[in-house]
Amino acid sequence: MISDVSRETQDRLQQFADLFQKWAKTINLVAPSTQEDMWQRHIADSAQIFSLADRVGTWVDLGSGGGFPGIITAILLSEHQDGWVHLVESNQKKAAFLRVALASTGARGTIHSVRIEDAHTLIPQCDFVSARALADLDKLLGYASPWLLDRPSTAFFHKGRDYESELKKAHGRWRFDLVKHQSSIQADSVILEIGNLQRT
């Protein structure tokens, strides 16, 4: 369970969890070995991103896959009656799952079943960009650059134990402000908060 949310939001999260388990039997939404501990490993872990944002805002979630963190953010936004999540997922089966998840939970979001490289024409601007288990940081910054370069937007990226080497590689092509947030769910994970992105 997630603390500090309403009963209605908790019910929405449970509804999503039940739907996820049903669809995961036929579609590879996350690594099967991580499904058993879904509340901690995926739902609570994803909810951390929303708690780090300084306002509600409009989000672009890249490579939304099984809905982490995009659907979780969209469900948490339902509590505020404001803000929106644009979930970008090119895989048609996963996009179908995400559409059903949004419809059944009443979460605040839209699915864009396009390649990330084409998404900016549909979503010209946002306040926040998120991604989880999608690509290394250098590649992520390339994907997110249309929303971050010379803009006041902020990115939140989940990263595991190799994040330092990813940062080193990314600094070869990019300059950015960085805040490292230690994950409260997984000891060897961080959430990288990135702003003021510029090319080197």
Image (spheres, rainbow, N blue to C red):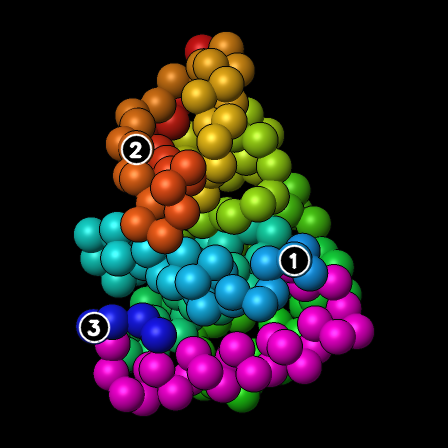
Q: In the image, what residue type sits under mark 3?
A: Asp
Q: Earlier in the sequence, mark 2 or mark 1?
A: 1
Q: Is residue 169 visible?
A: yes
60 and 123: which is toward the camera: 60
Q: Quadrant of residue 176?
A: top left
Rendered residue at 33%/82% (across/down): 9
Mark carried by residue 4 = 3
Label 3 neighbour load within 10 Å: few <14, some 14-19, many 20+ = few
* Horizontal and vertical percent position of residue 124: 48, 50
Q: Is residue 8 magenta?
A: yes
> Where does label 2 land, which residue?
180
Q: Is residue 199 left or right of residue 127?
A: right
CA distance for labels 2 and 3: 23 Å
Please state if 136 lies on the left or on the right of 164 as rendered.
right
Q: Main secondary structure of the magenta part?
A: helix
Q: Amino acid at mark 2?
A: Lys
Q: Please, is residue 29 above or below residue 21 in the view?
A: above
For the record, the magenta segment spans 5-30
For marks 2 and 1, give the CA distance: 27 Å
Disc 1: which residue: 33
Marks 1 and 3, how far apart at CA: 28 Å
